[in-house]
């Protein structure tokens, strides 16, 4: 279906161009962000206010911030890069410390320090590089603090971020960025505390024109924006439309998650065949004999609608259940602009025509007042090339239950408790299944979903969780 935009005489190409311009100007240009993310982080220049310098001089006069003998143990290492000295007493802080004040940079196979940039491809040689600066040892025992008060605001072409780290030590702080990512390590409280900050900024900044201002009571990051527009938020949060469609792809292989094969979750859901055990069939016959499953007059009000698809009948008394119900027993499918029922597949592109389609099956009305239950006991297990999922829904009604999947996504709606309760289940499966070779088995006390795996490997878990999978892979690589 083709839509033509005529509002205000704009063409579709003009509107798309304007939308893309807005996206780019607000720092949401995904291609630019991806390119920048591969660039190395470079230091941001630091300015220390006179008040902070005076405080540092007082610390040096009263006792070096790197000298905390009463709180240190013999053998405590110096925290400066490339210094291997250890604390052996108060005199240790008087010796010179030869170290790298910069940060390590790994880029295009080369390894070097930002302060001297002696490049090498060998990691051992990189670690053995002698420091390029002489200063004081840092033996201070530092407490890592995760929660630090901070705020931010826009100011024309600048973004100001305040970190309330009182008594920051400039020589022991690092601030670096590649334009979009900004990392800060702040040692403060006169050298006794340390906090790490990671910012994925909403927009791009000019690193060389940005500045860190360290005062007595706080650290202010003054960031020069590439585009002088107001940021609605400090952090970049990609929307669904901008997200990489393959970002969360995972498959099962020998019980491991690997981001290689596409998870095609956009395919339409198709019904899974249902088998009813003899015990469940006997129970259904007893129910029909004792009480029509579609009749619940003692709990219903006049006007209650029939719950079957495409049936417009309402409950007007016990005799209502005796009339035929013409309905669609299948599920609604919307795919590639077409709309149809899985039971008859009369396709149409018009939603009104779809709603007006007469049912293809005649059966009983379903007027029962159903209680929706969210928490239902369930379990699962691997069995060779199958995965078994048990839903403990006693007294399930097959004709009023639906089970469908597209291989990765599995949706179930089960009416049970002799028609008085209903529960919906959504599974984003760990691996892919063969829908046509899977089966739903309804017995007296439970519903068992027997799912045939595409790959006959053991699943470590039932549900796919891209964030958890990525974390586990990183931990495994480490």
Image: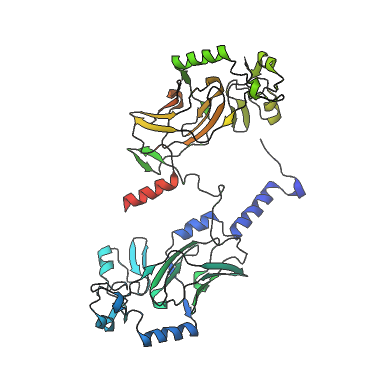
Quadrant of residue 451 within the rendered picture: top left
Who is closer to the viewer here, 445 or 6?
445
**Does residue 361 appear left or right of residue 112 in this picture?**
right
Task: Identify the image quadrant of the N terminus.
Answer: top right
The percent position of residue 318, horizontal first and vertical second, equals 68, 16
The percent position of residue 248, horizontal first and vertical second, equals 46, 45
Is residue 268 in sight in this rendering? no
* Residue at figure coordinates x 62%, y 64% from the top left: 230
**Does residue 224 appear left or right of residue 46 in this picture?**
right
Q: Where 81 sits versus 461, above or below?
A: below
Who is closer to the viewer here, 439 or 432?
439
> Farthest residue toward the front?
298
Quadrant of residue 121 within the rendered picture: bottom left
Is residue 70 in sight in this rendering? yes
**Does residue 42 appear left or right of residue 18 in this picture?**
left
The percent position of residue 295, horizontal first and vertical second, equals 63, 18
> Farthest residue toward the bottom?
61
The percent position of residue 60, horizontal first and vertical second, equals 37, 85
Q: Where 394 sits versus 18, above or below?
A: above
Task: Identify the image quadrant of the C terminus.
Answer: bottom left
Q: Where 66 sits versus 340, above or below?
A: below
The image's colouring method is rainbow
Who is closer to the viewer here, 113 or 295?
295
């Amino acid at each position: 279906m083709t839509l033509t935009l005529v509002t205000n005489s704009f063409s579709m190409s003009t509107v798309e161009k304007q939308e893309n311009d807005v996206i780019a100007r607000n720092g949401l240009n995904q291609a630019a962000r991806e390119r920048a993310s591969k660039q190395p982080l470079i230091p941001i220049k630091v300015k220390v206010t006179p008040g902070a310098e005076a405080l540092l001089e007082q610390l040096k006069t009263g006792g070096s911030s790197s000298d905390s003998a009463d709180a240190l143990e013999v053998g405590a290492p110096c925290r400066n890069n490339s210094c291997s000295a250890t604390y052996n007493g108060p005199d240790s802080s008087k010796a010179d410390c030869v170290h790298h004040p910069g940060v390590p940079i790994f880029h295009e196979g080369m390894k070097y320090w930002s302060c001297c940039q002696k490049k090498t491809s060998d990691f051992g040689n990189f670690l053995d590089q002698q420091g390029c600066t002489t200063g004081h040892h840092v033996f201070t025992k530092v407490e890592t603090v995760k929660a630090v008060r901070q705020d931010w605001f826009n100011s024309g072409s600048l973004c100001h971020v305040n970190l309330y780290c009182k008594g920051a030590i400039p020589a022991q702080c690092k601030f670096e960025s590649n334009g979009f990512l900004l990392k800060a390590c702040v040692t403060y409280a006169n050298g006794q505390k340390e906090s790490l900050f990671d910012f994925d900024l909403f927009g791009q900044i000019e690193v060389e024109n940005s500045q860190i201002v360290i005062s007595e009571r706080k650290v202010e990051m003054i960031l020069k924006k590439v585009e002088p527009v107001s940021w609605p938020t400090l952090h970049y949060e990609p929307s669904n439309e901008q997200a990489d469609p393959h970002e969360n792809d995972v498959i099962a292989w020998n019980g491991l998650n690997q981001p290689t094969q596409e998870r095609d979750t956009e395919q339409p859901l198709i019904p899974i065949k249902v088998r009813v055990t003899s015990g469940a069939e006997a129970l259904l016959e007893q129910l029909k004999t004792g009480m029509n499953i579609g009749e619940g007059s003692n709990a219903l009000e006049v006007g209650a609608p029939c719950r079957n698809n495409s049936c417009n009948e309402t409950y007007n008394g016990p005799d209502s259940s005796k009339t035929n119900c013409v309905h669609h027993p299948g599920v609604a499918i919307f795919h590639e602009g077409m709309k149809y029922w899985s039971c008859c597949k009369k396709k149409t592109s018009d939603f009104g025509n779809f709603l007006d389609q007469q049912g293809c099956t005649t059966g009983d009305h379903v007027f029962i007042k159903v209680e929706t239950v969210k928490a239902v006991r369930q379990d699962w297990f691997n069995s060779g090339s199958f995965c078994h999922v048990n839903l403990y829904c006693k007294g399930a009604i097959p004709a009023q239950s639906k089970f469908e999947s597209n291989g990765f996504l599995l949706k179930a709606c089960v009416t049970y408790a002799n028609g008085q309760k209903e529960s919906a289940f959504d599974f984003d499966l760990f691996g892919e299944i063969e829908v046509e070779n899977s089966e739903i088995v309804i017995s007296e006390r439970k519903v068992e979903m027997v799912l045939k795996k595409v790959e006959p490997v053991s699943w470590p878990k039932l549900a796919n969780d891209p964030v958890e999978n990525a974390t586990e892979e990183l931990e495994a690589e480490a």
